[in-house]
Amino acid sequence: MMKHTPRPWRVEIDQDAYLIKSGKNHLIAVMEGTVGEYGNDEYDAHLMKASPDLYDTLEKIAHGPVSADKTVLLIQMEVVKEMAREAIGRAVLLDYTVK
């Protein structure tokens, strides 16, 4: 299993760059010269910030129990889908829940 910089990660703006930093102020990534250039930079930075959360969610899904009982399996699939929607929502700064 890979180890990544512990969360939380955060996004800071420094002049013309987005900085992705850990909770202990460790610099993880710099997106230089991108602030406002393409219009998607803030979303890209927040997607990078969400990487540990997305990874952890995928780990839980990949290694979670699977039931042989069809009814229990359907319930488990709904739980997995909700976990995925919540993680995606945190990554893209939107409410990604299905209504």
Image (spheres, rainbow, N blue to C red):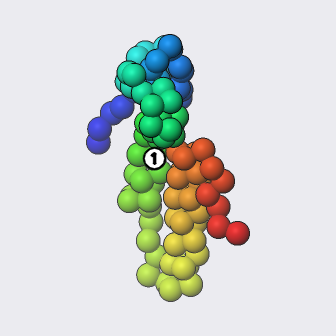
* Residue at the extreme bottom of the image, as rendered: 70
Location of residue 8 with respect to 44 vertically, above or below = above
Three-letter code for the amino acid on which mark 1 is drawn = Leu
Seen at 53% across and 52% down, the residue is 88
Q: Kindly identify which residue carries mark 1.
A: 54
Using residue 22 as the reference point, say whether residue 82 is left or right of it: right
How far across and how far down the image is residue 2, in percent? 29, 38
Residue 37 appears in the rendering: yes
Q: Which of 90 and 73 is in front in this view?
A: 90
Location of residue 83 with respect to 73 vertically, above or below = above
Count the labels in the image: 1
How far across and how far down the image is residue 96, in percent? 61, 57
* Residue at the extreme right of the image, as rendered: 99
Using residue 40 as the reference point, say whether residue 5 is left or right of it: left
Seen at 58% across and 75% down, the residue is 75
Tell me which corner region of the image, top left, top right, bottom left or bottom right, holds residue 12: top right
Residue 50 appears in the rendering: no
Seen at 58% across and 51% down, the residue is 89
Q: Quadrant of the N terminus?
A: top left
How far across and how far down the image is residue 85, in percent? 56, 59
* Residue at the extreme left of the image, as rendered: 1
Location of residue 22 with respect to 47 vertically, above or below = above
Q: Tell me if mark 1 has few (under 14), some (14-19) or many (20+) residues whose alpha carbon lies within 10 angstroms of its own.
A: some
How far across and how far down the image is residue 7, in percent? 49, 29
Element at badge 1? helix
Seen at 45% across and 31% down, the residue is 37
Q: Nearer the viewer, residue 78 or 86?
A: 86
Q: In which quarter of the image is the C terminus?
A: bottom right
Using residue 58 as the reference point, say whether residue 88 is left or right of it: right
